[in-house]
């Protein structure tokens, strides 16, 4: 491929799935081009069935196919499709058939799996093998609660983005960045951990071959190509299929001096390092070593994120209130009295429900006066998130040996100016906010590199982001 061919822009489709909504995006990428247009948006969320809380994967697939058809209507020259989504959730299959809709990670059944796993392999030992923080909904804990009869007939397990890729191509693979969140991957070797599988009584054959970002998963099945109006030559490319892995690709940072916050439903706060950090200090601080693109490690901690605010708003709306988020945040910014902060990582805040009542109870249990009124409670949520972000960024830098000088905040949280400013104020460091669409851009960047439209390492990709999507700077108040 000559220089002119390398520099030309190409079109790709990015399927970007979050825990509350999904999108299909047309991306155009070249040496000096990084553009995106959302052509389809659709809801995504938990469905309560008699068996528990599930994802409606069948509906999700239909939305994705419709979105890809719309993308090809917008850009018939699309050459590749990349898929990213949230982590840990999966479906079990027998042959081509899915054995039930995937469970949602917020389903309470996962609590039972923790004790079952730790009886066989304590968390301290697990951490030395998989490098993951303790989260009760991690894939291996979910698997420990599966019906043995279902496991006995299953011949494959596919995580959500891999499951979509299978439906599009017929190829069963497991992309490494998302596989690293399951607890079944060895953090040091980068392969499935035979000892963990043996402890859980799982057969290695259940897990698909591992594939890395930039690799081709496969061409579209003929029936899928016909459904979306594509040629059968169009293929699916492996990207950082864990949405945070894709988001971190598009953080325009210097990893030696910066921490990142990928802020949406969750706030993923961390640093990027060369290799896993498997110390007791990292384990006790509840940090995790997750796979990144190009073999990098995302040393990070999950902070509850804007879920707290969105679930609070939903509770008020269930009570009949008409809440406009921009107006609520403006009122929160105008609150002049000090508001108390709470521990956003308290497990009580994980499940859907009456979030205002839970926050109030947290304060009352400690003899602290709870915020009075919606604006004050919203401000308390923002202040609590900002403090958690600031503290976690500093801890991440210390654990990862990073000389912290800047915090980069990407994702939907960049639209929350109050959160960005208060994170800067509480950390005493500048916050560079943007791009808001970091996950989709990371998805597009890796597809572009795989197609030869751009070249270079992660820093080269991030330089393109900085040129085309310069962040907004928030300096700490003096």
Image (tube, rainbow, N blue to C red):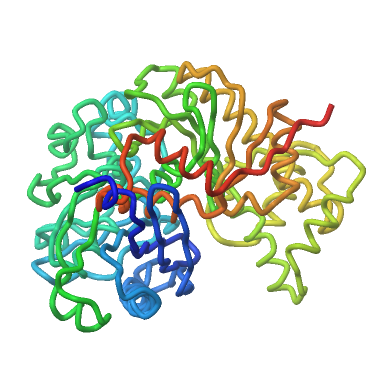
Residue displayed at 49% across by 35% down: 301
Between 358 and 247, the one nearer to me in the picture: 247
Between 207 and 227, the one nearer to me in the picture: 227
Q: Residue 218 location in percent, x, y?
A: 15, 61
The correct choice, above or below, for 265 with respect to 294 in the image is: below
Residue displayed at 59% across by 50% down: 349
Classify residue 400 as left or right of residue 364: left
For the image, the number of numbered tags is: 0
Task: List the single residue furthest toward the right.
Answer: 336
Residue displayed at 82% across by 53% down: 332
The correct choice, above or below, for 226 with respect to 79 in the image is: below
Locate residue 13: give its quadrant.
Answer: bottom left
Classify residue 407 as left or right of residue 95: right
Classify residue 25 as left or right of residue 88: right
Residue displayed at 73% across by 49% down: 417
Q: Residue 124 location in percent, x, y?
A: 33, 24
Between 171 and 228, the one nearer to me in the picture: 228
Quadrant in the picture for the C terminus: top right
Locate residue 384: give its quadrant.
Answer: top right
């Amino acid at each position: 491929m000559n220089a002119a061919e390398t520099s030309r822009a190409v079109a790709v489709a990015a399927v970007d799935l979050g825990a509350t909504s999904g999108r299909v995006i047309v991306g155009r990428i070249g040496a000096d081009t990084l553009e995106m247009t959302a052509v389809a948006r659709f809801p995504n969320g938990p469905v309560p069935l008699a068996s528990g809380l599930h994802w409606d994967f069948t509906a999700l697939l239909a939305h994705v196919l419709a979105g890809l058809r719309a993308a090809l209507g917008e850009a018939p020259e699309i050459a590749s499709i990349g898929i990213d989504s949230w982590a840990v959730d999966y479906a079990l299959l027998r042959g081509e058939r899915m054995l039930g809709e995937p469970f949602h990670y917020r389903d309470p059944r996962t609590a039972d799996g923790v004790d079952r796993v730790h009886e066989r392999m304590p968390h301290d030992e697990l951490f030395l093998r998989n490098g993951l923080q303790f989260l009760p909904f991690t894939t291996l804990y979910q698997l420990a609660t599966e019906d043995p009869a279902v496991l006995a007939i299953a011949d494959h397990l596919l995580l959500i983005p891999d499951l979509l890729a299978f439906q599009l191509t017929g190829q069963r693979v497991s992309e490494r960045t998302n596989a690293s969140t399951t607890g079944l991957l060895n953090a040091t070797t980068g392969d499935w951990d035979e000892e963990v599988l043996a402890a859980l009584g799982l057969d290695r054959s259940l897990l698909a071959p591992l594939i890395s970002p930039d690799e081709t998963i496969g061409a579209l099945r003929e029936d899928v190509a016909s459904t979306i109006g594509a040629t059968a030559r169009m293929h699916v490319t492996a990207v950082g299929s864990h949405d945070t892995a894709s988001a971190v690709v598009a953080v325009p940072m210097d990893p030696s001096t910066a921490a990142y916050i990928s802020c949406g439903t969750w706030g993923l706060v961390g640093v990027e390092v060369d290799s896993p950090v498997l110390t007791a200090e990292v384990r006790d601080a509840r940090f995790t070593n997750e796979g990144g693109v190009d073999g990098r490690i995302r040393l990070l901690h999950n902070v509850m994120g804007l879920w707290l605010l969105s679930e609070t708003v939903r509770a008020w709306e269930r009570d009949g209130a008409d809440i406009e988020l921009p107006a609520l945040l403006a009122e929160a910014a105008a609150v002049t009295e000090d508001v108390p902060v709470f521990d956003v990582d308290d497990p009580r805040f994980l499940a859907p429900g009456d979030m205002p009542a839970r926050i109030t109870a947290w304060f009352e249990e400690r003899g602290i006066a709870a915020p009075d009124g919606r604006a004050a409670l919203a401000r308390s949520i923002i202040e609590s998130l900002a403090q958690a972000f600031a503290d976690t960024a500093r801890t991440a830098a210390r654990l990862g040996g990073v000389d912290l000088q800047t915090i980069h905040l990407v994702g939907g949280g960049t639209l929350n100016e109050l959160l960005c400013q208060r994170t800067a104020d509480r950390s005493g460091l500048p916050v560079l906010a943007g791009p808001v669409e970091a996950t989709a851009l990371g998805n597009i960047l890796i597809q572009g590199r795989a197609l030869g439209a751009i070249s270079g390492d992660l820093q080269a990709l991030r330089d393109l982001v900085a040129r085309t999507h310069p962040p907004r700077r928030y300096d700490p108040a003096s």
